[in-house]
């Protein structure tokens, strides 16, 4: 995809240029249609609409945005997506505080990043992806995940306290560029266009930039410690447009430097400034422990991150796996419940996309792991159900993704996670630890590093006592009016699609 700069032209000229370009795409689409390629013709028009509309929306008025959303509604293929676009239009009309994220994206992000974001996630992953997932289900008999998390390296320039990946060796990168390329090619056959890259520190591997460029029909969210950004790297990311860094931050300077090392916070601040100036879409990643929970449960911290330019963010509860695996570092049950409440408040009132694997499980109808919506491939190629569940039965070097997803380990993991009815307690690692022990023993899954088995042995008693205490708070919240929508079966789009695909499976059987 080439980067468009129409937003710098006078509006009448930019509009004329966009119309002419769209007409050219329409001619190509008509040829595809006449050749019997109906889906390809539709995709050509959808991509062209997004590609040409985005530059025009850089300085959009409310009416411009509403027109764009109405056009998307017209071409949306599914009733669910049409309903969501109508709801989005209402929020724009009402000037809802949360819609500020949309305005921030178009104001602050560069055109290239915006085009990739909307074209890849909107057209490739959702529109085209829905069709490809239906075909995949008919061929293979199971639903593919929506994203893949990959750790291409364990090398890192920091030595953070409690790092979940800290017990993996840091000496070399067994996974070659060719293997990474194969993973993504196999993923796209399953309609996976969203990849998350972690480590280690991913930006240590410079060849990954070439991987992102080769697969520019995908987007890559990269978890990074934020210390390796240079003007040259930022310029390359702006040119790529499909790489969205998520910078690890533990609070302010005191909390971040205590866990990550002296001077790291200032490097992070400099990185955020460079990314914001370049118009790159980026966010934050926070590991919440007992020691920083109060700081990161204060809404003012998220106001600070918005001011720094973060568009999105992820909260991860500290889990005692990896280096310095200490259950006493975990948040208290009360801190976890307080964080859940703050996340809901920020989402209602702030222009920030903030997500939490645990508290947001009501949006996805439960846990994402074991290929239900995502999986993890570590630096050696071990295919793990979750980045925090360091066990496997398959390795990408001697199997395909499809084979791993159909393995007894992953199938049993998915079956057990559905038994967790309170979606605020979705996790079989920390909320239902006895189920993790059960699936590992039943399927003979092996630990992917020395000490990984501690989560179901020496830490098990503390984890299970902790989860029993949190269950009292979570059950009260789950039964409240606040979650009526989730108990009544309204889910995020992918979970709703999952119900549809399960219907196809039922018909086939």
Image (tube, grey):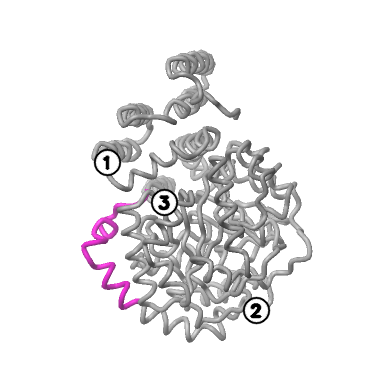
Chief SS of the magenta region: helix
Where does residue 492 sit, x and y in percent of width and height? 36, 50
For this view, does 426 lie left or right of residue 62? right
Which residue is pictured at 59% across the width and 41% down the height?
Answer: 188
Please give the residue where the numbered disc 3 appears in the rendered image.
353
Rendered view: 403 above or below 264 = above
Task: Report how many numbered discs are placed on residues in the image.
Answer: 3
Please give the residue where the numbered disc 1 appears in the rendered image.
95
Rendered view: 298 above or below 488 = below
Which residue is pictured at 53% across the width and 50% down the height?
Answer: 147
Q: Could you give the CA–CA distance between mark 1 and mark 2, rounded to whole angstroms?
A: 51 Å
Q: Earlier in the sequence, mark 3 or mark 2?
A: 3
For this view, does 245 lie left or right of residue 423? right
* Residue occupying the far right of the picture: 172
For label 2, the crowd category at 10 Å Cα-Cα, with few meaning under 14, some 14 to 19 and many 20 or more, is some
Q: Earlier in the sequence, mark 1 or mark 2?
A: 1
Q: Quadrant of residue 486?
A: bottom left
Give the SS element for disc 2. Answer: loop
Instruction: Residue 130: tell me if it is visible.
Output: no
In the image, 503 versus 324, the foreground residue is: 324
């Amino acid at each position: 995809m080439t980067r468009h700069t129409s937003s710098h032209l006078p509006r009448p000229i930019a509009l004329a240029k966009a119309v002419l370009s769209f007409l050219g795409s329409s001619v190509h689409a008509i040829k595809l249609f006449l050749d019997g390629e109906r889906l390809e013709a539709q995709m050509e028009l959808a991509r062209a609409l997004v590609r040409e509309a985005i530059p025009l929306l850089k300085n959009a008025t409310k009416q411009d945005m509403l027109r764009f959303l109405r056009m998307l509604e017209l071409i949306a293929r599914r009733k669910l997506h049409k309903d969501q676009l109508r709801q989005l239009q209402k929020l724009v009309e009402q000037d809802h505080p949360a819609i500020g994220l949309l305005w921030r994206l178009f104001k602050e992000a560069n055109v290239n990043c915006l085009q990739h974001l909307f074209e890849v996630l909107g057209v490739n992953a959702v529109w085209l992806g829905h069709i490809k997932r239906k075909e995949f289900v008919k061929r293979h008999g199971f639903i593919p995940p929506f994203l893949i998390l990959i750790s291409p390296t364990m090398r890192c320039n920091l030595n953070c306290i409690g790092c979940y990946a800290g017990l993996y060796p840091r000496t070399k990168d067994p996974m070659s560029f060719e293997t990474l390329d194969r993973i993504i090619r196999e993923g796209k056959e399953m309609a996976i266009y969203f990849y998350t890259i972690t480590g280690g520190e991913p930006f240590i591997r410079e060849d990954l930039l070439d991987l992102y460029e080769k697969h520019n029909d995908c987007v890559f969210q990269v978890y990074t410690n934020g210390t390796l950004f240079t003007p040259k790297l930022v310029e390359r990311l702006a040119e790529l447009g499909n790489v969205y860094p998520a910078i690890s931050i533990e609070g302010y300077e005191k909390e971040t430097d205590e866990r990550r090392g002296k001077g790291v916070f200032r490097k992070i601040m400099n990185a955020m400034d460079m990314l914001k100036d370049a118009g790159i879409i980026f966010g934050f990643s926070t590991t919440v422990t007992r020691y920083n929970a109060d700081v990161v449960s204060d809404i003012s911290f998220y106001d600070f991150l918005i001011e720094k330019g973060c568009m999105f963010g992820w909260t991860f509860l500290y889990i005692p796996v990896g280096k310095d695996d200490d259950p006493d570092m975990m948040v208290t049950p009360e801190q976890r419940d307080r964080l859940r409440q703050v996340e809901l408040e920020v989402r209602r009132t702030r222009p920030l996309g903030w997500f939490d694997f645990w508290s947001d499980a009501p949006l996805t109808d439960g846990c994402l792991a074991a290929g239900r919506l995502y999986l993890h491939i570590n630096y050696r190629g071990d295919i793990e159900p979750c980045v925090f569940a360091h066990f496997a039965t398959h390795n990408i070097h001697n199997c395909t993704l499809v084979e791993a997803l159909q393995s007894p380990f992953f199938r049993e993991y998915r079956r057990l996670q559905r038994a967790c009815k309170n979606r605020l307690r979705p996790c079989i690692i920390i909320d239902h630890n006895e189920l993790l022990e059960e699936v590992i023993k039943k399927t003979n899954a092996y630990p992917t590093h020395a000490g990984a088995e501690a989560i179901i042995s020496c830490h098990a008693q503390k984890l299970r006592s902790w989860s029993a205490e949190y269950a009292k708070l979570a059950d009260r919240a789950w039964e409240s009016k606040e979650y009526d929508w989730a108990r009544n079966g309204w889910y995020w789009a992918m979970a709703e699609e999952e119900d549809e695909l399960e219907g196809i499976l039922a018909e086939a059987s």
